[in-house]
Amino acid sequence: MQFSKRKFRFFFLSFLRHDFKASITVFFVALPLCLGVAQASNTPMYAGLIAGIIGGMLISLISKSELSVSGPAAGLTTICAAAIATLGGPEKGMPLFFMAVFIGGFLQILLGVFKLGGFTHFIPSAVIKGMLAAIGIILISKQVPLLIGYNKPDFWRNELFNILTLKHGFSEIKACTRLFPKVLFLWPFFHSYC
């Protein structure tokens, strides 16, 4: 009986030293991500919180893996927004969308229970790499207007060509855009001396 108390104490101290700090970090990263993905998908904020709770707690309890990745996926925001709009907008389409997500999750649980995850090897790697590249392009393109100091939603329709012709409506460019090329130029010299 004494050995089990020592073992419990060891694992508890190990949890406090490593896992607890990591869980706090993951929480502070995942919470804004859950809310942002919910807002970008045109769903209520509570849907993002529920998805984060289920992805963070329930999956880690069910999964037997030591390392698992679950939670909100920024690449699915366009699919979610389009599905809700196609199903009838926020009022009519939201319950249908949530039912589709529930059925998809149930099918994933069945695939896991019956050990049918090996079917993912039939998906070509080019499809996965293309999807990940598209997600990266979407995320980078959303940050470009903010980088140059323009925070209105019509950047890609109206202001992009005005910037190229230098007739843009905003003249204040953030200091980071002026500093960034200088840092890129001086970085090899700084790095070689350190």
Image (spheres, rainbow, N blue to C red):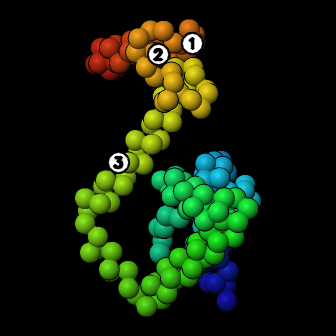
Earlier-in-chain disc, 3 versus 2? 3
Q: CA distance from mark 3 to mark 2?
A: 27 Å
Secondary structure state at the residue bearing disc 3: helix
Earlier-in-chain disc, 2 versus 1? 2
Secondary structure state at the residue bearing disc 1: loop
Q: Nearer the viewer, residue 153 or 108?
A: 153
Tell me if mark 2 has few (under 14), some (14-19) or many (20+) residues whose alpha carbon lies within 10 angstroms of its own: few
Question: Is residue 54 depicted above or below 178 in this figure?
Answer: below
Whether pointer 3 and pointer 1 mark residues with C-beta atoms closer than 8 Å, the reply is no
Q: CA distance from mark 2 to mark 1?
A: 8 Å
- Read off the residue under disc 1: 169
- Read off the residue under disc 2: 162
- Read off the residue under disc 3: 133
Image coords of residue 103 (percent x, y): 57, 79
Instruction: Please name the amino acid that badge 3 sits on.
Output: Ala
Image coords of residue 42 (percent x, y): 65, 53
